């Protein structure tokens, strides 16, 4: 009988490439930064959490082919975000935030902040990165979207709106970038084991009026066939695949990692 082991990392050589990952201090962004550095890239790790970025850089294993360059930055400073992306070969738009409230109770200033960080900042980062990618005739744009970029859920108006907008921005970049050797795709996770999801559990408990221990099974994973949280490293491997030469024909798509949620 043949035993199938746990698959290893996809083969990827990014030596000589410069990557930028937003929201890199934790969760999916942290996993992506470490994965791309392991493949040999120089990774500009962007986050407003300076201490988290320093911890990320310290956790890079000795002997790793690439490197981590911590860059503390608040993405609501859109001009600074655009400047930070200049000269990058690979852009991972990952930074995000979440608030769970009914529309009529949703603070307008938070709605504005979510759209700024999760949609307008990716647009400005693209503006900064694309000239270099076009000049070199190669580039990879990976937008960490969500199942909520494809489906809506109640009480998440800002997040759903931002992710749906990111899907359209990604497709537009794919069409414009194709003649220049640049691909643009979304990765669409379900619920991932991150601090953001941990905070959502408390918010959802309040919104639905149920105990926190029921939120994971009865709300977050109710429509998933695979009843577990996705791990950040699994998302990072999907990002890595989209950066391989074998994925050069994959552009303008949404790669869904949702445990069967959208199969309904």
Image (tube, helix red, strand yellow):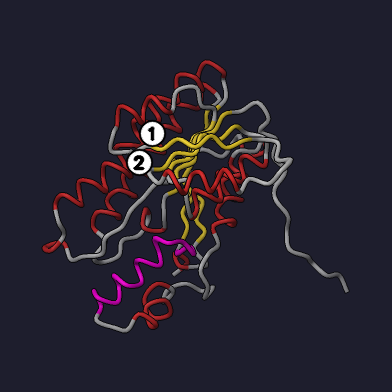
Q: Secondary structure at mark 2?
A: helix
Q: Residues within 10 Å of mark 2 (few under 14, many from 20)?
A: some
Quadrant of the rendered structure where residue 137 is? Answer: top right
Q: Which residue is most to the left?
A: 104
Q: Quadrant of the N terminus?
A: bottom right
- Tell me if label 1 and label 2 are in contact, CB under 8 Å: yes
Which percent across, then down, holds residue 35? 62, 46
The answer to whether residue 210 is left or right of residue 91 is left
Q: Compared to 180, does 34 lie above or below?
A: below
Magenta residue span: 191-208
Residue annotated with mark 1: 172
Give the dominant element type of the magenta stretch: helix, strand or loop: helix
Q: Secondary structure at mark 1?
A: helix
Which percent across, then down, holds residue 133? 51, 22
Residue annotated with mark 2: 168
Quadrant of the rendered structure where residue 249 is? Answer: top right
Q: Nearer the viewer, residue 146 or 41?
A: 41
């Amino acid at each position: 009988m043949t035993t199938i082991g746990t698959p290893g990392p996809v083969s990827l050589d990014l030596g000589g490439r410069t990557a930028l990952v937003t929201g890199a201090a934790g969760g999916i962004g942290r996993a992506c930064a470490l994965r791309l550095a392991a493949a040999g890239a120089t990774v500009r790790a962007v986050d407003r959490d300076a201490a988290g970025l320093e911890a990320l850089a310290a956790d890079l294993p000795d002997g790793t082919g690439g490197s981590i360059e911590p860059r503390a930055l608040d993405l609501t400073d859109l001009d600074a975000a655009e400047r930070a992306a200049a000269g990058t070969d690979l852009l991972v738009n990952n930074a995000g935030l979440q608030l769970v409230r009914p529309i009529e109770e949703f603070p307008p200033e938070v709605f504005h902040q979510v759209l700024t960080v999760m949609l307008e900042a990716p647009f400005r980062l693209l503006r900064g990165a694309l000239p270099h990618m076009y000049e070199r005739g190669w580039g990879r744009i990976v937008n960490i979207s969500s199942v909520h970029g494809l489906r809506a859920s109640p009480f998440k108006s800002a997040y759903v709106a931002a992710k749906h907008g990111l899907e359209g921005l990604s497709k537009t970049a794919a069409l414009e970038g194709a003649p220049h050797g640049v691909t643009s795709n979304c990765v669409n996770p379900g619920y991932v084991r991150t601090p953001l999801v941990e905070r959502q559990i408390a918010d959802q408990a309040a919104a639905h009026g149920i105990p926190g221990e029921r939120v994971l099974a009865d709300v977050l994973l109710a429509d998933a066939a695979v009843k577990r949280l996705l791990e950040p490293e699994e998302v990072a491997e999907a990002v890595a695949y989209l950066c391989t030469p074998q994925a050069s024909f994959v552009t303008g798509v949404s790669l869904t990692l949702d445990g069967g949620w959208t199969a309904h």
